[in-house]
Image: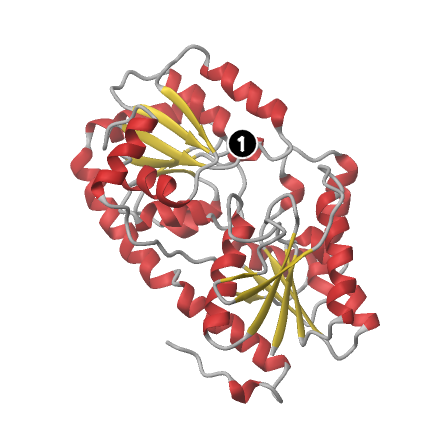
Amino acid sequence: MKIAFIGQKGIPCRQGGIEKHVEELATKLATNGFDISVYARPHYTAKELKTYNGINIVNLPSLNTKHLDAISHTFISTIHAILNNYDVIHYHGVGPSLLSFLPKILSPKTKVIATFHCLDREHQKWGSFAKFMLAMGEWAACHFPHETIVVSKGLQKYCLAKFNKETTYIPNGVSISQLVVAKKQNEILKKFRLQSGKYFLVVSRLIEHKGLHTLIKAYQKIKTNKKLVIVGSAAHTDAYATRLRRLAGNNKNIIFTGQQSGNELEALFNNAYLFVQPSETEGLSIALMEAISYNLPVIISDIKENIEVVGKFGWQFKNKNARDLADKLIFADKNPAKLEQLSKLAKKKINKEYDWNKISIQVGEVYNTHLPRLSLNYKFAR
C-alpha cells in the first residue's frame, strides 16, 4: 500500500509538532510494511536525503514565505502524488487540507485522509485573511477527506459541534531514544553553562501562542537558584523572538539555546528540574509528552489540551497569568519530593495512553478500512 504524507515541512524533525508526529508515525508504518513517502521542503530537509528510516523522501520546492510556504508546497506535492498513483494521500494540518479536494476530483480511486492537529487560526502570528483561510481549512478537513483523524478529544468535540463531523480520535504519541552517556551529557550542559537539576525547561518554537512571554514574566518575579532554559527558534516570528529577549533583559539566568535536537535535546530534557508548558493554545503537545517520558514533573497552563495529557499529575496555572505561574514555580522549587511523586504517576499515564506503536496500528487500520483489497498484506508488530 503506497501512502503519501503531505503538509509537514519534512523529516527528520528539527522543530515542529507536526514534523515530529509525521516522523514517528511514518517510521512505525514503514516498519510494518507500508510504502511511505513523506513530501519535504528543501529549506527544511536536505535535497540529497532520499530515504530515512525506511521512508521515501520526496523533496519538492515551495515559495518559502510566511504565508505561501505551506500552501504552495501542498499544491505541488498533491499534483505529484496524484501523478504517482498513491493508494492513500494523507494530509497533515488544516491548512494543507484546503487542497484535499484535488485528489477526490483528479484521482477518484485514491483515498484521502486528513489529520486535524490543532486550531491554527487561533495563533496570533496570522493576520485576518490567513485566519479566514485556516478556518476554511478546518471546514475542508472535515468535509473532503474519506476520513478525518483528530489528535485530541477536545478537537473531536470541536469538529462535532462546529461541523457536525464524526472524527476518529488517534492521539499524538511519545518515544525517547537511548539516553546520551553521562560524559556526553556533561559536555552538553557545560556548553550552555548549566548544572543537572538546576534549571527549568521549556521546549517550543518562539511563537506567541506558546506563551513564552508569560513564562519569562513569571520567572522574573521569583527568586531561585535555578535557571530558565528556553529551547527553540523563531518560525517566521522574528519580532516575537526579539520581544522575548527584551523581556529577559540582562538576566543571565535566562538562556536561549536556539533550536536543539538529538543528543543535545535529550541531555537538556534528562537533566532539567522541571518542564513548563505555558501555551495559550495547543493541539496535543508532543514536547509535553516527551518531558514526562524523561520523568520530568510539569507545570502546565490550564487549557484543556494540556490537562488531557497530564490529568491531575502536574501543577496547573491560569492561562496567560504570570503571577499565578510565578507562584507555581516557587512552590515547585521548594517541594522536590512532591514533584518526584507526580512525575512517576504522569509517566505511567502517558506510557499507557500515548504509545506510538499502538497509534501506528490505529492509523494503519484506518487505511485498511478504506482499502480492504490491500489490507491482507499487513500484519502489525504489536
For mark 1, give the secondary structure.
Answer: loop
Q: How far from the left and from the top, in percent, is residue 272?
A: 29, 35
Rendered residue at 51%/56% (across/down): 21
Q: Point out the image quarter for the C terminus.
A: bottom left
> Which three-letter amino acid code belongs to the residue tagged 1?
Leu
* Direction from residue 133 to residue 333 in the image, left or right: left
Rendered residue at 24%/34% (across/down): 186
Q: How far from the left and from the top, in percent, is residue 90?
A: 64, 65
Pointer 1 residue: 206
| View extreme (right): residue | 105
| View extreme (front): residue | 48
Residue 103 in view, yes or no: yes
Q: Point out the image quarter for the N terminus.
A: bottom right
**Vertical relation: 70 (above or below) 362:** above
**Vertical relation: 140 (above or below) 203:** below
Rendered residue at 32%/60% (across/down): 351
Q: Name the foreground residue: 62 vs 271.
A: 62
Q: How far from the left and from the top, in percent, is residue 32?
A: 46, 76
Q: How far from the left and from the top, in percent, is residue 190?
A: 28, 27
* Direction from residue 361 to residue 374 in the image, left or right: right
* Direction from residue 332 to residue 156 in the image, left or right: right
Rendered residue at 34%/56% (across/down): 350
**Vertical relation: 65 (above or below) 328:** below
**Vertical relation: 382 (above or below) 27:** below
Displayed quadrant of residue 63: top right
